[in-house]
Amino acid sequence: MRIEEAQVVADWVRDLALPAGSVCLNIGSSTEAFRRSMQPHVGLLFDQLQEAGLRIVHCDMKRADGVDEVGDVLDPAFQDRLRRYDADLLICSNLLEHLVDPAPFAEACASLVKPGGWALVTVPYSYPYHADPIDTMFRPSPEELVRLFRGWEIERGQILDCGHFRPGRQALINHLGRVAMPFYRRDRWWPMAHRLLWLFRRYRQTVLLARKPA
């Protein structure tokens, strides 16, 4: 999640003015260490939501500190467990581009939110290849993204400008040197070569707030 993206998500959730105690499922949450150390702006985002009175439930496939519910969203038993939270809001950030078929996953996520609830979903719109462990290059607009949530309506949608690739001089020299050796560890060469395109392009993120029919 980009810093600019985290701020928009926080602002949009606050604007919903959900009652204190409302449940937010954070799907694909990763770990406490990731949210606090690797991307501290993500930790700050959820601190802000908790201060606004939301109950955050972090959900991920890996068992680790900071993960409240461990399981696969495509597993019916895990879905049943999450539905018991009667969630008002679901957040799914930068996950769908890493799925071979995002439609069943989005459908499963949609089933976890109570009628009249909300989903806040982000995906890259203009962004380099980044495998985790794959990247399908799924880069939808808000209008394209909401189609995965059948019957839901767009409340807000934005393609957010998030700057571009700005390495320091030495980092750029090192980066170019590595790209000049495509024969060495090709699995890592392609992502690095692709990222150079963003010296001239802007990073942009699709941010979607959609509402489930009541």
Image (cartoon, helix red, strand yellow):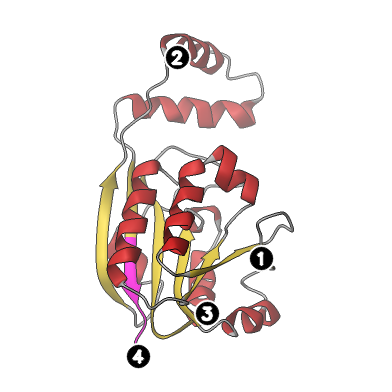
Q: x%, y% of residue 76?
A: 66, 81
**First in residue order: circle 1 vs circle 3:** 1
Q: Secondary structure at mark 3?
A: loop
The label nearer to you, 1 versus 3, is: 1
Label 2 vs label 4: CA separation? 51 Å
For this view, does 147 lie left or right of residue 96? left
- Residue 172's disc is 2
Kindly identify the amino acid type of the residue bearing the numbered disc 3. Leu
Q: Secondary structure at mark 4?
A: loop
User: Is 60 in front, or is 68?
Assistant: 68
Kindly identify the amino acid type of the residue bearing the numbered disc 4. Ala
Name the residue tied to disc 4.
214
- Residue 68's disc is 1
The label nearer to you, 2 versus 3, is: 3
Label 1 vs label 3: CA separation? 16 Å
Residue drawn at the location 52% of the way across and 79% of the way down: 112
* Magenta extent: 208-214
Hey, which quadrant is residue 207 in on the image? Answer: bottom left
Q: Is residue 213 magenta?
A: yes
Residue drawn at the location 41% of the way across and 62% of the way down: 121
